[in-house]
Image (cartoon, rainbow, N blue to C red):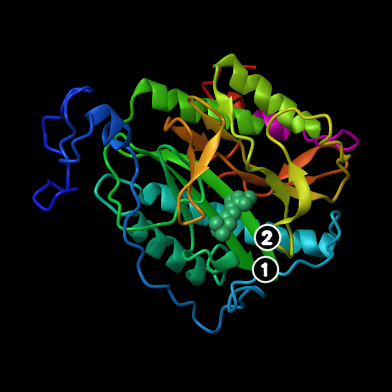
Amino acid sequence: MSAEAPASPPSILPTANDACWCGSGRKYKRCHKPLEGKVLPGMISPRRVVPPHITPPPYAETGKVTRWKESAVKTPEVIERMRVACSTATEVLRLAGEFVRPGITTDEIDAYVHQLCIDRNSYPSPLNYSGYPKSVCTSVNEVICHGIPDSRVLLDGDIINLDVTCYMGGVHGDTNATFPVGEIDDENRNLIAVTEECIWRGIEAVVPGRPLSDIGKAIETRAKQDKLGVVRAFVGHGIGEQFHTDIQVLHYYDASNSTIMRPGMTFTIEPMISLGSWQHRMWNDDWTAVTADGKRTAQFEHTVLVTDTGVEVLTAGSGAASPNAPWKRSGSTQA
Ligand code: MF3
Ligand code: CO
Ligand code: CO
């Protein structure tokens, strides 16, 4: 770029084969066109502080995640603590979603979520998890997951996923949802609606004695009805005293995901559904995952408990961003 070159695009953009506005001498389509309208990294604010009366998880100081053996089936006592952490995460996610509007930055959402967690005596689990710098993940438009809150301003028509995890009583509760920013178009509205249907199809497939692969099968089947992509690189996970344990929950059908669901197991279901391809690319920050084709993607996440007869969704119920299956809501005519 030459010294006089404009740093930001002009209000009237070149056509594809014209010279790029930046002065590179390259055709617009070979230079800045692929980036127009895409999410760009902003400035990340200094690390937020957690007051000393909040009990931090083991990685909070060092950023290093050391795994230990943790039973996939939880004791009633652990489950009771998980109910508390999960209901806190549920409330924080709903409040964070209500805070979303055009004109605010994702860093402002981070500050809000950070404080909401602390006010409820919980540690925001993402903070310094493997060095992650913020207290919530904010994934806008083509960002699949793990977007880092920064100085980017939310625009009317964006969609944003907020992924909240709270650590309290020695356990984590993990939940996320995708929210519209201002007015969104029909394609985006449908993407969010179908993604929410996908997670609830997956939840309904949680049955003791059945393999985990039933969950991915149910999700993939629903996504395919709308010709949407199912992201493969990120999966649901066992959760409890550790943020991520070794259970993996694939969101597409794979017979090898054959672990049998047993009462007392706790894991997340968190499908990422895209308007185009399921492949991803990683930003240089090594966290932000975007769709390879730059098309938009949505996600919902719940922490679930396998019961003797089916499933208890620990991050659902009244006061949740996604409280129950859309087809069970009043006014729904779907089965
Ligand atoms: N909450 C995310 C999940 O659903 C994990 C975020 S890890 C972080 O698994 F380090 F990015 F916070
Ligand atoms: Co999460
Ligand atoms: Co998760």
As measured in the structure, the alpha-carbon distance from the residue carrying label 2 to the one carrying label 1 is: 9 Å
| Residue count near mark 1 (Cα–Cα under 10 Å), binned few <14, some 14–19, many ≥20 | some
Quadrant into which the C terminus falls? top right
Q: Is the C-beta separation of discs 2 and 1 under 8 Å?
A: yes
Secondary structure, mark 1, is loop
Residue labelled with disc 1: 65
Relative vertical location of residue 74 with respect to residue 55 in this rendering, above or below? above
Residue at image point 23% right, 33% down: 26
The answer to if 141 sits in the magenta stretch is no
Residue at image point 54% right, 16% down: 226
Name the mark on residue 243: 2
The mark lying in front, picked from 2 and 1, is 1
Q: Residue furthest bottom?
A: 52
**274 relative to 156 in the view: left or right:** right
Relative vertical location of residue 149 with respect to residue 322 in this rendering, above or below? below
Q: Which residues are magenta?
A: 201-212
- The answer, for residue 320, to whether it is visible in the render is no
| Secondary structure mostly taken by the magenta-highlighted segment of the chain | loop
**258 relative to 151 in the view: left or right:** right
Relative vertical location of residue 281 with respect to residue 105 in this rendering, above or below? above
Task: Classify mark 2 as within 8 Å of ligand 1 or not, answering yes or no.
Answer: yes
Give residue 124's position: percent from left, percent from top. Answer: 54, 65
- Mark 2 / mark 1, whichever is N-terminal: 1
| Residue count near mark 2 (Cα–Cα under 10 Å), binned few <14, some 14–19, many ≥20 | many
